Amino acid sequence: GDGRAHGRRVLLKLSGEVFGGGKVGVDPDVVKQIAAQIASVVDEGVQVAIVVGGGNFFRGAELQNNGMDRARGDYMGMLGTVMNCLALQDFLEQRGVDTRVQTAITMGQVAEPYIPRRAARHLEKGRVVIFGAGAGMPYFTTDTVAAQRALEIGCDRLLMAKNGVDGVYEADPREDPKARKYLSITYREVMRRRLAVADPAAFSLCADNKLPIVVFGLGEDYGIARAIRGEPIGTVVAS
Ligand code: UDP
């Protein structure tokens, strides 16, 4: 059951930060703009699955620092991702894109449960599938879930949309303005240089399974659309 035979299929990871436009909650203008970019390429036949983060609402680790039980905080974090999913779903459907939200914590009134083969079927029919509630498990991150979902449903690439940085640099560009951006880099070189691409669990899932990662900036004009199309953008991490 490997979806890679079905033509181009990508997994886009959108962090919660994106949805909030830097604040707590959802910024409708930002989500509308992202939906427009996605809608513009779905017509072209690329199958698009999306994993949505929730850092614009809650992060379990931060709640723990404020005295809450970690696992409960993590569940709050996962529930936050679902609100982002519904906002994105709404703006995509306003654009005429068929969508399904699948969550790792069941909530039948608002979303389907996560069923990988059904997700693949939706994608084949041209629907955008939005995955929410992370892995449904505390102590995980949505980056890791993005890598896992991409592997399980057979995506060709994991597209990591970043705020404030447009690829992988040889050093942190905020600290060293002369640092150069890689157009492509191997997993091995990322590890050797200890570069931050995704969280370590997500990165090692990709490296172990040779899933290419495209790191690109949200600030780039039509960056999401270009990344989905497979145009050269940002940095490609592969073997
Ligand atoms: N989370 C979790 N398990 C998961 C995914 C997420 O416990 O499988 C929780 C965790 O507390 C995390 C929060 O949900 O801080 C929001 O997810 P994440 O930080 O990955 O979102 P992003 O950084 O992409 O906005």
Image (tube, rainbow, N blue to C red):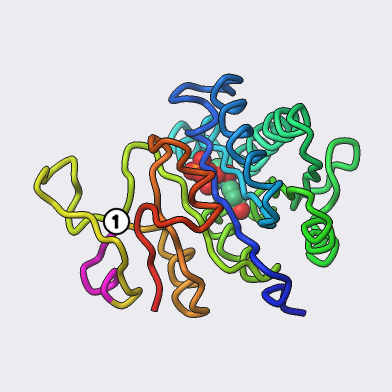
Picture quarter with the C terminus: bottom left
Tell whether position 194 is magenta. Answer: yes
221 sits left or right of 165 in the view: right
Which residues make up the magenta segment? 189-195
98 sits left or right of 77 in the view: right
Which residue: 67% across, 33% down?
A: 88
Vertically, is 59 above or below 116?
Answer: above
Camera sees residue 71: no
Which residue: 33% across, 46% down?
A: 166
Which residue: 59% across, 28% down?
A: 31
Residue 62 in the image: x percent, y percent? Answer: 45, 37
Q: Residue furthest front?
A: 44
Vertically, is 41 above or below 55?
Answer: below
Question: Toward the viewer: 182 or 46?
Answer: 46
Quadrant housing residue 83: top right
Tell whether position 86 is magenta. Answer: no
Residue 69 in the image: x percent, y percent? Answer: 57, 41
Residue 56 in the image: x percent, y percent? Answer: 52, 30
Residue 207 in the image: x percent, y percent? Answer: 44, 75
Camera sees residue 54: yes
Q: Residue furthest right?
A: 109
Q: Amino acid at mark 1?
A: Val
Question: Toward the viewer: 159 or 5?
Answer: 5
Picture quarter with the N terminus: bottom right
Estimate how packed mark 1 is, as few (under 14), some (14 to 19) or many (20 or more) residues with alpha carbons within 10 Å: many
Which residue: 43% across, 25% down?
A: 22
Which residue is under mark 1? 168
Q: Secondary structure at mark 1?
A: loop
